[in-house]
Amino acid sequence: MFKLNLKIAWRNLWKNKVYAAINIGGLALGLTAFVLMLLYINYEKSYDSWSPELKNVYQIREKHDFFTPDNKEHWQEISNSRIAGIIKESVPQFTAVTKIDQEWGNGFSVKIDHADPVMVKGIKDADSAFFNVFPYQFIQGTAANALKEPNTVVIKQSLANKLYGTDHVLGKEFKLVRWRDDTGNSLKITGVIADVNTPESIQFNAVSHTGDQDHDPDQIGSSHYTQIYAKSEGDIDTLSANKSLQKVYVDFKKKSFAAEKLNFKDVYKDGKSPGLKAISLKDVHPNPPFSLNWLDKLKPVIGISIFLLVVSIINFINLATAQSVQRAKEVGVKKVLGAYKKQLILQFLIESTLQSISALFLSVILIEILLPAFNHQFNITLSFWHNEYLFSIVLQLIAVFIVVTLLAGCYPAWILSNYNPVSVLKGNYGNSLKGITLRNVLVIFQFIISVTFIIAIGVMHLQTKYISGKDLGFDRDKLINLRTGYDQNFADKIRRIPGVQYVSTTTQVMGNAFNNKSKIIYKGREVNLNGVTVTMDALQTLGVKLVSGRLFAKEYVQDTINSVVLNEAAAGLLGKNMVGQTYGKVDYQGKTITFQVVGVIKNYHNEGFDKAVLPTVYKVSHLGGTSNTNNLLVRFDTKNYKGVINKIEGEWKKLYPDFPFQYQSMDDAFSEILEENKRFMNMVVLFSVVSVSLSLLGLFALSTFVAKRRTKEIAVRKVLGASNFQIVNLLNKSFLILVVTANLISWPIAYILVKKWLEGFAYRIDLPLYPFLLSSIISIVIAVLTVSIQARKTAIAEPVAALKYE
């Protein structure tokens, strides 16, 4: 019986090739979007799962306001390096602790013998305890001895093959140059570790042990911030461990403040509080310090994927029931011959399963085709067949397949098997009316999703256009950043190159900003500003716009001592007419220094548009600040500056032969800031096109169904003199009601969703009306055209054929 049903199912699918192709194609598109999301979710969940021992590894997070984008307290991944020693001494739950330095800049230079230097990202400097905490597999060397001595390095197998063409590199040496004029360290390779097969929070290609991380700063007021990781012997009570951490941390801060002659309560006021905690390594990636976690970022796309799958299933149901009139007599004859209802349901479920299997195979092909573009879109590396969790993914696919088959097949099977054979064989299909309400609801649901997507595209386009054309407060044209510290000798050399207008540095520039809290005293009240240090002509280099007063200039000697420039946000915070006003600032020795405001500039953006520009004060230093800015700005006075950059690179190679030349244009930095929103918009546009296409297929199915159901009515109307145009209008009218209803429902839904999306931007458009109107017009026009095509076929048919059995 099963074999017979399978043969009948195959013949029916082959007989209705167009419907079957539409059904399978639509379901395959929905499954493809859903499976891509499954792959991505599995990828994100697989972070730090490459060894079972990692469940005992914890990251130490300290709550502080250093290096934060908003100068406010956050739980950060970098902590005072002294904390590692405190944990070793006072928190017995942790048996091993390691410190890992931050990787500054855009990678380090690796020089091997007489070869040209190459830039390598992900070289982390750690103390000797790194491999006591992290259980990497050694191909060469041992965990116990690899980082025992200073100036040693352990590299991953992939880097060994890249640098040397082999992983047998034990004992070899290379020179590591961390910045432009660094003399470098000669590091001996004492170990090679295997690359892990899942993504990891601590992304690195090599771990060096220079010895710098073995010691903390000697001076009381100095501090060094590193990542700190700790390992426990077995399972521990994290709550109890964090109580211990908090206690020893508060004691440590009190002793530190006492040594610096600071009052603990004065430091921690206005809502500030000391904090130290350990979080499990598996929770590190899902909880970044300054941004949304991956799940929150992905929720809209996951929602879209689920909606597409649902639309595909709805489409499947509508197309299946649209053929019910054609299958009605078949069902009637089978029932008369003694077929049971469950046998008929089984037959139609087999057809549904065949289509689902075909859709699944087509989906896998589409996934392989689309994966490269998907990887590029999300900046990741996913694979379907070469996946560590392929078995898990296959099980998930089987579960999705079963659910889809049941959802998509049960309703049509139940409807088709429920026909009354007597009525059917008499030519009466009245029972098919029972499901029309549900099919109308499904079409409305499809169009609600489609219209919402169209509105979202419109609003996103307007917001993106607004941001792209927004006044940044500075001129990004003909401006590059060399991403290196300021050196007077090098700066003087490139100033003499024709085509170079300005050379300067600042701690605040798009793509590489270092925010630093600056507490001032103005008219007796304390105010927190963002402090930025610049060279004399940095503001001119940026091309900022002056609101009042003047910019820094060499003609004014006091500009290098106590002159400052404010941005509009700072001037608005302090008061009007700030030029000429003074304020005080307490230095490290407790003395109050007076600064005078000489100018106010427009706010300029150095970060994404999701953050408001901070109230900022600019102060001149001949070196660009008390810390290395890692920015060297060069402005050109010619648009054709590629040749000028080549000359700058020539000067660079003369002075710094061991460190490759790197730069970024401000146009590229601006594009990077917009990249995430651009990717998201592209995803929404793609899914919207698919959603609208599937909705049209659903509408096509329902219009076909209705046209067939009303064939005799249309024939009678034609006999009585109705024109083709009147008949097309008759059929269009009922569908227009569905589409208009969908629009009325989708407007408030779309309003809520896009308003929430816009709230993620500090600078955004006012929600306009015309994307809503445009979406309604588009959906109505598309619906009318789709239905009219099917209605015209019915209208021009000969009425005799429909009435010949009457």
Image: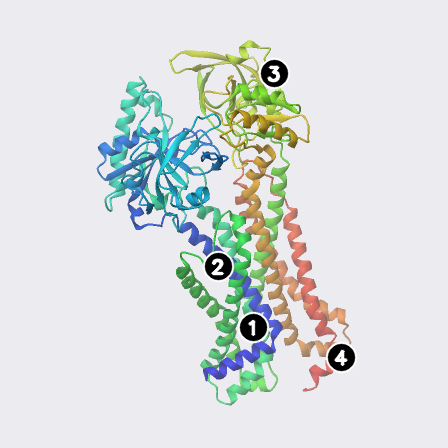
In the rendered image, residue 548, in percent from the top left (x then y), is placed at: 61, 18
Label placed on residue 549: 3
Residue 747 in view of the camera: no
Gap in Å between the C-alphas at discs 2 and 1? 24 Å
Circle 1 — which element? helix
Label 3: element kind: strand
Sequence-wise, which precedes: disc 3 or disc 2? 2
Quadrant in the rendering for residue 95 = top left
* Residue at numbered disc 2: 35
Q: Earlier in the sequence, mark 3 or mark 1?
A: 1
Identify the amino acid type marked 3.
Gly
Residue at the image point whose x is 59% and y is 30% from the top: 480
Secondary element at image label 2: helix
Q: Position of residue 210 (x, y in %)?
A: 35, 31
Check disc 4 and give the amino acid type: Val
- Could you tell me how far apart the alpha carbons at marks 4 and 2 are, in whole angstroms? 52 Å
For the point 53% across and 82% down, the residue is 8
Residue beneath the point at 38% across and 45% down: 168
Query: Looking at the rendered structure, which numbered label has been put on residue 320?
Result: 1
Residue at left 30%, top 31%? 83
| Alpha carbons under labels 1 and 4: distance apart | 31 Å
Please state if 330 lies on the left or on the right of 200 as rendered.
right
Dot 3 surroundings within 10 Å: few (below 14), some, or many (20 or more)?
some
Q: Nearer the viewer, mark 4 or mark 2?
A: 2
Q: How many residues crowd around disc 1 within 10 Å: few (fewer than 14), some, or many (20 or more)?
A: many
Q: Position of residue 2 (x, y in %)?
A: 46, 82
Taking depth in this image into account, of 229 and 347 the one nearest to the observer is 229
